[in-house]
Structures are given as structure tokens and as C-alpha cells.
Amino acid sequence: MLCSKCSRDILPVVVVDVDGVLGKYHEQFRNFAMNYLNVNLPRGYNGSTEYSDYLGLEKTIYRQIKLAYRQGGIKRWMPVYDGASEFMQHLSNMEVEVWIATTRPWDRLDNIDPDLRHWLDRNKMPYDYLLYGEDKFLQLSNQINPERVIAVIEDQKPYCDEAEAIFGDVVWQPLREHTHGAAFREGRRFASWDSVLVDVEVKVKRWISR
């Protein structure tokens, strides 16, 4: 499909979240918080409550730790889920635009963008655009035609539901330890990245034939 004004290809869009989808945020943050407070904290977060409540931390303390975690550049070394880098590389070889959409960290953003870009580059995860904010999907829908979005990969149920309300039945939730309990959603869920890639490939072919 070509733009009627500029004759450029209009590509379908795949939107990918970072924390909890590509990177093991909860594991890394727990370890950082334990060192920060010099206490032991529970592991095995299953998403049934807010992470601060699960860790037994008051919201103000949790935010202080989260701010220190962000400002310290720790995210540059966040562990990667198996197959995540390869998944992003496969997407980059398809006829799609890849948007990274992540929620804005509480209170400060200054060094978060370079840290995230460093992490993505270091782990060989190609992308076309970055989007920040708790209203990330609304932002995206204001920037592009929502019909272009053929897949959204998101772990948090509220954001899955929001994306589905805006873009339709295109949302995938990864099967992770933290996407059980109240975080579990009915709909597309995947244990293998290949499931998403197959779906995207089919939709790209349909898009090209339009």
C-alpha cells in the first residue's frame, strides 16, 4: 500500500513493550531493591497485585528505590528473556514498522531514553520508533492510523485491555511468571516467540495484498 500523497510505502505496525516482555525487569529490580534496603524480599511475583505491595514496600519507598534504579543506569544491564533478541531481529526483516512502547518512569525521564536505547542496541534489538508514557497506546493512535497496528506485545493486563480497546484483537500477552493471577487475560497468549511471528507474517501478507 502506498501513500496517496508521497507514494511511500505505508507499512503495518508491530508494537512491543520492554519491561516484562523483552527484559526481566522484576528479577533485576528485586535484586536492586534488596541491596538498596539491605533486606530480603519475596521472589516469584505472579502479577496478582501491584509489585510494590507484593514486595511489602510502602509506595513512597518503592518510588524512591525505583528512581534510584532508573538514575543509576542499572537498566542498561537488565537480563533479556530467551529469544527476545532473535524475535526483534526477525521483526526487523519483515515489512513492518517496529514501535517500542514503554511506560514513563515515575517522576523523572532524563537519562531513561539513552539507557533504554543502549540496552536495545547492546542486545541487538532493532526498532524504528520509541514511545514513552502511561498513555502510550493513546499516543500511538493519535500519531498513526490505528488500523495499521497488526500486533501489540504487552505483559500488563490493564495495558493489554487498553490496547485491545484501541486497536482491536491484535494483542499478545507473554506467558511469564508475573502474568498469572489477576494479571491473566483471556485472549492471545504465547510461550514461544514463533507464535507471534507466524501471526505477524500472515497479517503482513494480507496487508501487502490490499
Image: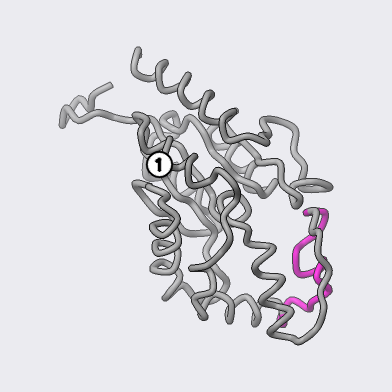
Look at the picture and state if 45 lies above or below 157.
below
Look at the picture and state if 53 lies above or below 16.
below
Query: Given the image, on which type of amino acid does mark 1 rest?
Result: Val
Quadrant, the N terminus: top left
For image coordinates 76% across by 69% down, the residue present is 52
Q: Residues within 10 Å of mark 1 (few under 14, many from 20)?
A: many
From the image, tell me which residue sits under label 1.
98
For image coordinates 55% across by 68% down, the residue present is 105
**Residue situated furthest left in the rendering:** 6
For image coordinates 71% across by 41% down, the residue present is 175
Magenta stretch holds residue 122: no
For the residue pair 106 and 154, the one nearer the viewer reads as 154
For the residue pair 184 and 192, the one nearer the viewer reads as 192
The x, y position of residue 119, in whole percent, is 45, 62
Q: Residue 185, located in which quarter of the rendered image?
A: top right
Number of residue marks = 1
The x, y position of residue 80, in whole percent, is 56, 55
Tell me which segment is drawn in magenta: 47-61
Magenta stretch holds residue 56: yes
Q: Residue 38, located in which quarter of the rendered image?
A: bottom right
**Residue situated furthest top in the rendering:** 209
The x, y position of residue 181, in whole percent, is 84, 47
Look at the picture and state if 138 lies above or below 185.
below
Quadrant, the C terminus: top left
For the residue pair 151 and 120, the one nearer the viewer reads as 120
Badge 1 marks a residue whose secondary structure is strand
Q: Tell me which colouring the rendered structure shows.
A: one colour
For image coordinates 55% across by 43% down, the residue present is 83
Is residue 191 left or right of 130 when viewed as pictured?
A: right
The x, y position of residue 183, in whole percent, is 76, 47
